[in-house]
């Protein structure tokens, strides 16, 4: 294996008087990128305050040193303020807002390790700050801030101007902060140094395993974790994860030696481990550790929330303390298979990597640590153009046309694995039977007509469709579309292209027509497959005309829709019960697995939003790592999107017909023009969860007054004024009087 597995120390990314933030970079620890893992450390000095933030990654936090206070706001929940101390493990799912505070003289150090598979940069965490010089307030315009939080222009400007500090600040002595509540800690944290032991071997070692039983939130994070304490000169038996999990290990204290054996029984790592270093064991590779006389302690995450699944191969005992030389340790029958024992024990075999990585990493840390107090601008996450785009015609004729959005003009289609297209049928226009390489949601934008839907191994369902209908189309479904009316029938398609032939685009496979499957097979195959004489097979192939869309002659008979076929196949969003209804503000109908079960098979959620004239949609973000793909059905308005580092990445006008995509965790807000605005969106999860930053359900309403005051860097009366606003409104805000 060519990837360097050498343990590394973290490097300072930013910091100041209040503390510092350290990260491990995939450029120095490539297995972070290979394994979709991120790792970082937060070190807070006395009165250091890590400003409220949320992340693009689910994580496990582990307190390495000191004690302090943490504020945790789970989506759609109240703030929990808990006391934290050395040994505490805390599970942090997607969308959780956290802050961290140290009131003691001893430095508070917290380790974070987590899954970056849905992050903006694989192998790295990206934090989104609610306050500070790089918080969302500095990203939105004063107009949007004023409207969203119901502040006069002067107060909105003052609030934005007051934002100082970048990520971490030092509070003045005597500043009041929320007191931890004992009851808040229940289910939120587990102290691994005090928890019951899962393994306890005398003079060997001890293990505490975090899983869904002792810390249920670990299940939402999708990770497992453990704390291992190995006694002086003891050995941790060779073993591997038998369920394809990665092990990411941080050495908490002590030192020792590690060997890792990979493909073909080759030793890929043989080095010293010291406190502060991080290393990753690839899937199925075998790892073993022997500690120095001082012992060694490490904290690991495992890329599965299930119970610890390492196969230990010395009976049921994972440690054995020995006074023998290293080369004799393998006298135990640890493995029956060839190759592994002798390569671990035979020093004559050359290791692929044998180094003193920790020492060199320490030198790197001293020579290249950042001295900046500012959070570095994450330019890489900002380069994608988010500008709304109109669809362009791909093909068409008398029967109608097919329009698509191209990833070359809307790059977020490719970035988000999303496709989008529209079909517009004239009177008597027929979109020939086809299937697609993508699961989709169809939405009827205009007109009425008939759709034929054939689910795999099922009979055809013929349904009447009309404006407002949403239809879920899983993989393998065959569809046709027909318009018998004078009004043009327009259907929008949006879906997941992660398994498509071309990322960000749909590819349709036609059953008939000049580019259908009949024209691809030879006459012999057509005749044999459909039991046709040769002349009839030739005639059938020759008769196929039209490409994708054809215009039928007047009077041609088509199947009549059946009312019973519509059951469970379509939901009319304009007639469905409202999920949100704010007088003078707006209304929402959400598609999910409850009201349209097939949405679950598609793997997408969707909603129709109607915003009243001059009303505002609260700033918010998807807190479960989902992308939002939005099509403007009618009306117009203005949109602002704030992304990484509090930068405004989009500020533009929206008009009917345009499509735009909000990246994961970016904050979006819209204000309708006097005519109002209506949009249909898909969300890349069938049951999405959104976190709103203004209004009654805002995360600000959950945070303690002391935290707000300290975060905003304002006087108590300013905080009280801010908190007194938007106490009744939720999601939509009617225009000011």
Image (cartoon, helix red, strand yellow):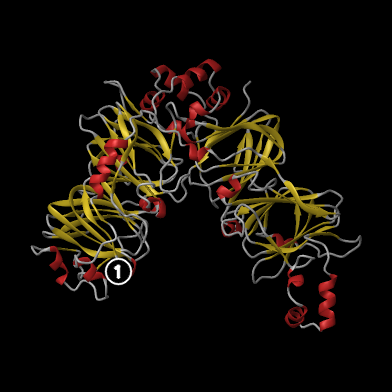
* Left-right relation of 285 to 534: left
Classify mark 1: residues with Cα within 10 Å, few (<14), some (14-19) or many (20+): some
Q: Count the numbered circles shown.
A: 1
Residue 612 vertical placement versus 361 (above, below): above
Q: Residue at x 56, y 25 (%)?
A: 141
- Horizontal and vertical percent for residue 556? 89, 64
Residue 181 seen in render: no
Query: Which of 273 and 219 lies nearest the eye of the viewer?
Result: 273
Evaluate whether residue 151 shows in this view.
yes
Q: Position of residue 508 (x, y in %)?
A: 69, 60
Residue in view at x 20 percent, y 29 percent: 105
Query: Circle 1 sits in a helix, a strand or a loop, which is it?
Result: helix
Quadrant holding the C terminus: top right
Which of 586 and 34 lies nearest the eye of the viewer?
Answer: 34
**Res 19 → quadrant:** top left
Residue 20 higher or lower than 516, as above or below: above
Q: Position of residue 252 (x, y in %)?
A: 22, 47
Residue 518 in the image, given as x and y percentages of width and height: 76, 72
Q: 317 or 324, which lies in front?
A: 324
Point out the residue furthest to the top here. 154
Q: Is residue 424 left or right of residue 682?
A: right
Decide if residue 134 is on the left or right side of residue 288. right
Dividing the image into 4 quarters, which one contains the N terminus?
bottom left
Which residue is at 31% across, 35% downward? 369
- Residue labelled with disc 1: 265
């Amino acid at each position: 294996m060519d990837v360097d597995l050498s343990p590394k120390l973290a490097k300072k990314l930013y910091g100041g008087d209040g503390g510092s933030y350290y990260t491990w970079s995939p450029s120095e620890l490539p297995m972070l990128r290979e394994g979709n893992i991120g790792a970082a450390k937060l070190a807070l000095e006395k009165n250091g305050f890590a400003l409220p933030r949320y992340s693009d990654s689910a994580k496990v936090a582990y307190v390495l040193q000191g004690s302090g206070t943490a504020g945790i706001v789970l989506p759609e929940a109240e703030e929990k303020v808990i006391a934290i101390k050395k040994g505490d493990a805390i599970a942090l799912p997607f969308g959780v807002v956290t802050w961290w505070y140290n009131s003691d003289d001893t430095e508070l150090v917290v380790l974070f390790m987590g899954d970056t598979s849905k992050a903006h940069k694989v192998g790295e965490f990206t934090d989104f700050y609610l306050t500070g010089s790089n918080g969302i307030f500095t990203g939105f315009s004063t107009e949007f801030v004023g409207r969203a939080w119901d502040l006069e222009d002067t107060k909105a400007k003052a609030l934005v101007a007051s934002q100082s500090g970048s990520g971490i600040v030092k509070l003045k002595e005597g500043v009041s902060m929320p007191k931890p509540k004992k009851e808040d800690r229940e289910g939120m944290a587990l102290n691994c140094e005090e928890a019951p032991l899962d393994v306890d071997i005398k003079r060997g070692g001890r293990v505490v395993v975090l899983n869904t039983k002792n810390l249920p939130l670990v299940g939402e994070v999708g990770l497992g974790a453990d704390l291992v304490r190995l006694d002086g000169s003891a050995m941790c038996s060779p073993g591997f994860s038998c369920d394809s999990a990665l092990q990411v290990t941080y050495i908490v204290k002590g030192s020792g030696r590690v060997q890792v054996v990979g493909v073909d029984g080759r030793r890929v790592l043989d080095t010293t481990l010291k406190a502060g270093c991080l290393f990753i064991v690839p899937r199925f590779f075998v790892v073993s550790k022997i500690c120095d006389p001082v012992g060694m302690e490490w904290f690991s995450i495992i890329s599965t929330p299930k119970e610890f699944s390492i196969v230990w191969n010395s009976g049921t005992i994972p440690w054995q303390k020995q006074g023998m030389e290293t080369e004799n340790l393998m006298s135990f029958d640890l493995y029956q298979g060839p190759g592994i024992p002798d390569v671990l024990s035979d020093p004559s075999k050359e290791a692929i990597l044998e180094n003193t990585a920790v020492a060199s990493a320490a030198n790197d840390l001293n020579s290249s640590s950042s001295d900046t107090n500012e959070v570095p601008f994450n330019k890489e996450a900002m380069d994608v153009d988010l500008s709304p785009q109109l669809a362009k015609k791909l093909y068409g004729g008398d029967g109608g046309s097919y329009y698509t959005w191209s990833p070359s003009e809307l790059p977020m289609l490719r970035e988000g694995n999303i496709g989008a297209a529209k079909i517009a049928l004239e009177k008597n226009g027929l979109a020939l039977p086809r299937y697609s390489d993508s699961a989709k949601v169809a939405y009827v934008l205009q007109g009425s007509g008939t759709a034929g839907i054939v689910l795999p191994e099922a009979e055809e369902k013929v349904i009447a469709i009309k404006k407002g209908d949403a239809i879920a189309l899983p993989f393998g479904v065959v569809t046709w579309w027909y318009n018998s009316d004078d009004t043009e029938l327009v259907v929008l398609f949006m879906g997941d292209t992660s398994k498509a032939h071309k990322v960000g685009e749909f590819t349709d496979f036609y059953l008939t027509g000049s580019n259908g499957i009949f024209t691809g097979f030879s006459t012999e195959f057509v005749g044999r497959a459909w039991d046709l004489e040769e002349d009839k097979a030739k005639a059938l192939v020759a008769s196929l005309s039209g490409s994708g869309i054809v215009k039928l002659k007047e009077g041609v008979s088509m199947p009549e829709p059946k009312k019973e076929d519509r059951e469970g196949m379509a939901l009319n969003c304009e007639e469905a019960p409202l999920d949100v209804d704010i007088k003078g503000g707006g209304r929402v109908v959400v598609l999910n697995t409850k009201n349209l079960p097939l949405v679950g098979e598609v793997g997408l959620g969707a909603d129709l939003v109607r915003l009243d004239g001059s009303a505002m949609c609260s700033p918010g973000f998807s807190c479960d790592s989902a992308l939002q793909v939005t099509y403007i059905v009618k009306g117009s308005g203005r949109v602002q999107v704030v992304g990484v580092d509090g930068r405004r990445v989009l500020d533009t006008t929206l008009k009917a017909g345009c499509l735009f995509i909000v990246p994961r965790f970016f904050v979006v807000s819209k204000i309708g023009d006097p005519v109002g605005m209506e949009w249909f969106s898909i969300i890349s999860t069938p049951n999405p969860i959104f976190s709103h930053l203004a209004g009654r359900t805002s995360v600000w309403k959950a945070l303690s007054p002391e935290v707000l005051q300290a975060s905003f860097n304002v006087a108590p009366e300013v905080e009280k004024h801010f908190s007194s606003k938007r106490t009744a409104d939720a999601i939509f805000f009617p225009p000011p009087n």
